[in-house]
Image: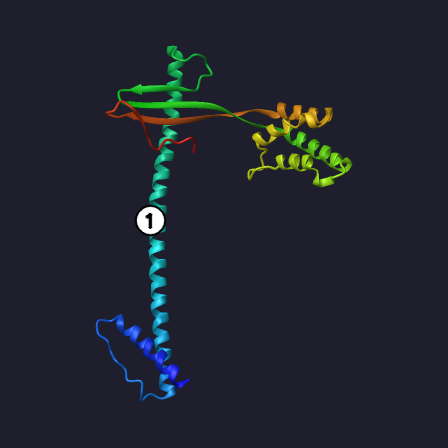
Amino acid sequence: MEKEKKNAAAAAGSGSAESGSAVKKIDLSGMSSEELDALMAEVSRQKNAQAESRRANYESLRKDLMNDVSYRLMEVVDDVTDFHDWLEGEVKAFSGVMREYGQTKNEDQISFTLIEGDFKMEVKGNRVKGFDERADIAAERLIEYLRRYMEKSSKGTEDPMYQLAMTLLERNKQGALDYKSISKLYELEPKFDAEYGEIMKLFRESNVVMRNAVNYYFSKKGADGVWHRIEPSFCRL
């Protein structure tokens, strides 16, 4: 045991000394067991102190980086938000001038492209559809329908048709039904009866235009004659 302590202390002392500019040699042969224990405790303390210092330096650098990134990011977000709000108002006003000048096909046109020299702005509007309150009624009816279907099925809740339909009724994080999932429910109509078809009809009627979304894209023509997208091109804020 005494020999192991001496070897460990010698190795620790050697490793610690190598990190300095000068190597201090310690004669361990004349040390008592208590002195070796104290030496090993000191070496362990120094190693822990070095590890703590590295940890503190790392956490300080990480904090400085995140604070700098957050500060500069929010500056950009504020600038882009101000630009978006300003652009939205300017484009809306210009759209009115376009209608008066007869440059739009109809009163509802919200998409157009403007080019001035080597700069291009595309305004693209699309109608965003969603499900109104009738979809909630349809979902409740469908769940009740599937419950009765499951009770009649020999496979019960293990029936793949039941499991599929219930999965497609799941809502997203915002609590809204997913259009693609509901569309897949339409495809199952041949598998069920007329009542199921009536529920699908209610789903279709509930899928209505909820709002108009307007996106803006910017491009600049290069020396090669090709339009190159300029960022930021944002969909919506």
Quarter residue 187 falls in: top right
Is there any visible trace of residue 37 in the rendered image?
no
Is there any visible trace of residue 232 in the rendered image?
yes
Residue 41 as seen in the image, left or right of residue 224: right
The front one of 2 and 126 is 2
Quarter residue 42 falls in: bottom left
**Which residue sits furthest left?**
22
Question: What residue appears at the point 38 percent right and 87 percent down from the top-left corner?
Answer: 33
Compared with 183, 24 (above or below) is: below
Under mark 1, the amino acid is Asp
Where the C terminus falls, by quadrant? top left
Where the N terminus falls, by quadrant? bottom left
Residue 181 as seen in the image, left or right of residue 197: left
Question: What residue appears at the point 38 percent right and 84 percent down from the top-left corner?
Answer: 3
**Which residue sits furthest top?**
102
Give the percent coordinates (x, y) of residue 4: 39, 81
Question: What residue appears at the point 38 percent right and 20 percent down from the top-left corner?
Answer: 93
Compared with 53, 74 (above or below) is: above
Give the percent coordinates (x, y) of residue 182: 61, 30
Label 1 belongs to which residue?
Answer: 68
Question: What residue appears at the point 38 percent right and 86 percent down from the top-left corner?
Answer: 34
Q: Is mark 1 on a helix, strand or loop?
A: helix
The front one of 160 and 94 is 160
